């Protein structure tokens, strides 16, 4: 299931070229330049309303940019190719975004059945993904309301990977889970990302989660990239006072707790 290794002249998996987006009078993205290299995990982080989810929606073609161009594997995303390019992406949201009237199996295989994959191919892929996501076999026949939060998220990840996409987009996938389940799934996501070799763009508010999963952390504020690089650079070489304040705010609860003890 691993993706082929990129060559030196390969275009990035995802690229934003001077992209801006506004919702009425509210600017969600200032002119944004962002490159996501093939095979890397890039984590978008920042305060609420900074534009993280807007980046994913534009990448999926759910919203058009006001200016600039979104490119997927070098191809400019537009109305003519959005459906074809969307099939090369997998999308995971909080709680998995599952259809409540479909079983886990039906949720995972929905697009494959729509594309008329042969039954044996679907069954083989389903079994491989269940093993990869560590979903118990008896959960496959259950409806979302019969699954735990962690199981729903595993099903959502399986559905996103079903068509073997080149690009995996995740929007706060673990935000609604309790800390123990979240920690377990963070470890599992890191393992899955390495095993499948996909390009990943993940949105989170959690700096520790970003540190665990990211090759590159992109800190955003008011629709702009403030700093992008390895987590160590944000912590030890902040680009401006906002980076320092953001990192300190994320670390403060732990430090306060240690002080209280």
Image (cartoon, rainbow, N blue to C red):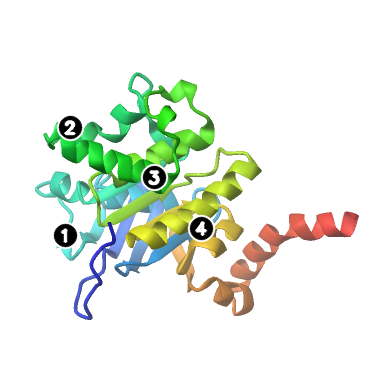
Residue occupying image coordinates x 37% and y 41%: 130
Q: Please give the label number shown on residue 113.
A: 2
- The earlier-in-sequence mark between 1 and 3 is 1
Q: Could you tell whether 113 is left or right of 153 in the image?
A: left
Say which of 156 and 128 sits in front. 128
Q: Which residue is identified by label 3? A: 131
Is 146 rendered above or below residue 111?
above
Q: Secondary structure at mark 4?
A: strand
Q: Residue 13, image x and y in percent?
A: 26, 64
Q: Please give the label number shown on residue 45.
A: 4
Pair 1/3: label in front: 3
Disc 2 and disc 1 in contact, CB within 8 angstroms: no
Q: Could you tell whether 9 is left or right of 31 in the image?
A: left
Q: CA distance from mark 1 to mark 3?
A: 35 Å
Q: Secondary structure at mark 2?
A: helix
- The earlier-in-sequence mark between 4 and 1 is 4
Q: CA distance from mark 3 to mark 4?
A: 30 Å
Q: Please identify the residue farthest to the left as the structure is shown.
A: 80
Pair 2/3: label in front: 3
Q: Residue 9, image x and y in percent?
A: 19, 79
């Amino acid at each position: 299931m691993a993706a082929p290794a990129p060559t030196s002249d390969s275009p990035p998996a995802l690229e934003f070229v001077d992209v801006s987006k506004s919702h009425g009078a509210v600017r969600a993205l200032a002119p944004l330049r962002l490159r996501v290299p093939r095979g890397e995990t890039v984590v978008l982080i920042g305060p609420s309303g900074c534009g993280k989810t807007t980046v994913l929606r534009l990448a999926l073609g759910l919203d058009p940019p006001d200016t600039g161009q979104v490119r997927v594997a070098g191809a400019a995303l537009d109305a003519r190719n959005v459906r074809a390019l969307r099939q090369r992406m997998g999308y995971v949201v909080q709680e998995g975004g599952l259809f409540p009237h479909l079983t886990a199996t039906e949720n995972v295989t929905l697009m494959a059945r729509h594309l008329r994959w042969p039954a044996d191919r679907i069954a083989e892929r389903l079994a491989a993904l269940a093993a990869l996501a560590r979903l118990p076999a008896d959960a496959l026949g259950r409806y979302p309301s019969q699954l735990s939060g962690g199981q729903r998220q595993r099903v959502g990840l399986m559905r996103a990977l079903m068509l073997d996409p080149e690009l995996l987009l995740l929007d706060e996938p673990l935000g609604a889970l309790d800390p123990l389940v979240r920690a377990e799934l963070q470890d599992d996501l890191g393992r899955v990302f390495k095993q499948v070799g996909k390009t990943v763009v993940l949105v989170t508010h959690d700096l520790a989660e970003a540190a665990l999963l990211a090759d590159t952390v992109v800190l955003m504020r008011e629709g702009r990239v403030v700093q992008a690089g390895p987590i160590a650079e944000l912590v030890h070489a902040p680009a401006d006072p906002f980076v320092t304040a953001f990192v300190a705010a994320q670390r403060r609860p732990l430090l306060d707790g240690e002080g209280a003890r």
